[in-house]
Image (tube, rainbow, N blue to C red):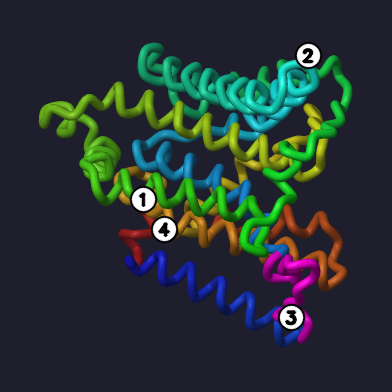
């Protein structure tokens, strides 16, 4: 475990201890009808979609990219799944939603790889148009979802614990296995640290970057299914709003370098938990919700400055 991941773990533990000191009920858990409930369970459950998106964002940032369209992908996925569910069933709805998310990732990747467009501009296109596409799919309405199987993705329980974190853990296990047990992790680090050298070494950087953007799209799609299943509706206007900021913040808090090359999936998951803990703490203390955005912006600023080359030379 690298130093950045340890640091993120210490920060998360410190936040939990601070909350426990201010609110003794913070660490309490109870069992009801075979299910676990409590503030810590709620934090992990609510952080699950962000963990999923953050892992996809981690891979993109590892190859010196960025994807600011993940919030729009969440809205598109939820809209497609909700539109397909009544007439075609659960399986088609899930495959259709994830298929739409993969197409979004493919679109972003092609703009970056084949079009040579800067990643932030390429994904800005879908960020702008994507939410409009979702609104067209839903006809500008909030589509209600009344399906027990679909709702299980966001509000179900497995072995007494919420199902959504299990999905995040399964994704982390899959990506972690690909990173550590195959050459994928080395290829990502090489393509991010020095793309030219990676190409000379035989790494198919273009194909790798394209695959990474598709994976990020799929992660946004899975998060869209989880979010819409939790609230049992597809809201094209609000689903995934500002999620891209939270994902980037989670990735940087977890120790992934914004300059590419060095990345940590575990760190990104811890970063997502830190963000959700901060949000929960602010609400629990009765502080105005608007303060949350200020805190997140301040953290993004501090992390970005700390990773800049000028700051590193001076420190």
In this picture, which residue range is highlighted in magenta? 24-41
Q: Nearer the viewer, mark 4 or mark 2?
A: 2
**Residue 255, disc:** 4
Residue under label 3, please give it.
28
Do the numbered discs 4 and 2 sit on residues whose CB atoms are within 8 Å? no
Residue 184, percent across and down? 26, 39
Q: Residue at x 15, y 33 (%)?
A: 197
Figure label count: 4
Which numbered disc, 3 or 2, marks the residue that appears first in the sequence?
A: 3
Which numbered disc, 4 or 3, marks the residue that appears first in the sequence?
A: 3
Query: Gap in Å between the C-alphas at discs 4 and 1?
Result: 16 Å
Q: Residue at x 87, y 69 (%)?
A: 286
Q: Is residue 7 left or right of residue 182?
A: right
Q: Nearer the viewer, mark 4 or mark 1?
A: 1
Q: Dot 3, how many residues are within 10 Å of its Cα: few (below 14), some (14-19), or many (20+)?
A: few
In front of the other: 315 or 32? 32
Query: Gap in Å between the C-alphas at discs 4 and 2?
Result: 38 Å
Q: Nearer the viewer, mark 4 or mark 3?
A: 3
**Residue 176, disc:** 1
Q: Is residue 58 left or right of residue 97?
A: left
Q: Quadrant of the N terminus?
A: bottom left
Q: Residue at x 43, y 21 (%)?
A: 109
Residue under label 2, please give it.
136
Residue 223, percent across and down? 62, 40
Q: Dot 1, how many residues are within 10 Å of its Cα: few (below 14), some (14-19), or many (20+)?
A: some
Which numbered disc, 4 or 2, marks the residue that appears first in the sequence?
A: 2
């Amino acid at each position: 475990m690298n130093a950045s991941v340890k640091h993120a773990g210490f920060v998360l533990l410190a936040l939990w201890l601070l909350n426990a000191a201010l609110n003794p009920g913070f660490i309490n858990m109870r069992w009801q009808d075979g299910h676990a409930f409590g503030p810590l369970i709620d934090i992990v459950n609510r952080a699950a979609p962000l963990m999923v998106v953050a892992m996809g964002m981690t891979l993109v940032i590892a190859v010196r990219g960025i994807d600011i369209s993940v919030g729009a992908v969440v809205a598109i996925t939820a809209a497609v799944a909700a539109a397909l569910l009544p007439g075609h069933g659960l399986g088609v709805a899930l495959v259709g939603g994830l298929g739409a998310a993969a197409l979004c990732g493919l679109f972003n990747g092609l703009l970056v790889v084949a079009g040579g467009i800067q990643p932030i501009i390429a994904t800005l296109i879908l960020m702008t148009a994507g939410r409009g596409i979702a609104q067209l799919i839903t006809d500008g309405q909030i589509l209600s979802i009344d399906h027990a199987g679909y709702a299980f993705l966001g509000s179900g329980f497995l072995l007494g614990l919420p199902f959504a974190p299990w999905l995040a853990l399964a994704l982390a296990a899959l990506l972690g296995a690909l990173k550590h047990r195959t050459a994928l992790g080395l290829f990502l680090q090489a393509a991010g640290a020095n793309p030219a050298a990676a190409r000379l070494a035989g790494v198919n950087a273009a194909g790798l970057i394209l695959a990474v953007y598709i994976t990020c799209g799929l992660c946004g799609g899975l998060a869209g299914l989880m979010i819409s299943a939790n609230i049992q509706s597809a809201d094209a206007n609000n689903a995934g709003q500002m999620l891209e900021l939270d994902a980037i913040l989670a990735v940087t808090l977890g120790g992934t370098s914004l300059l590419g090359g060095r990345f940590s999936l575990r760190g990104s998951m811890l970063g997502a938990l830190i963000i959700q803990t901060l949000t929960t703490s602010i609400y629990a203390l009765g502080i105005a919700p608007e303060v949350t955005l200020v805190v997140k912006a301040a953290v993004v600023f501090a992390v970005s400055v700390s990773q800049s080359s000028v700051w590193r030379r001076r420190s």
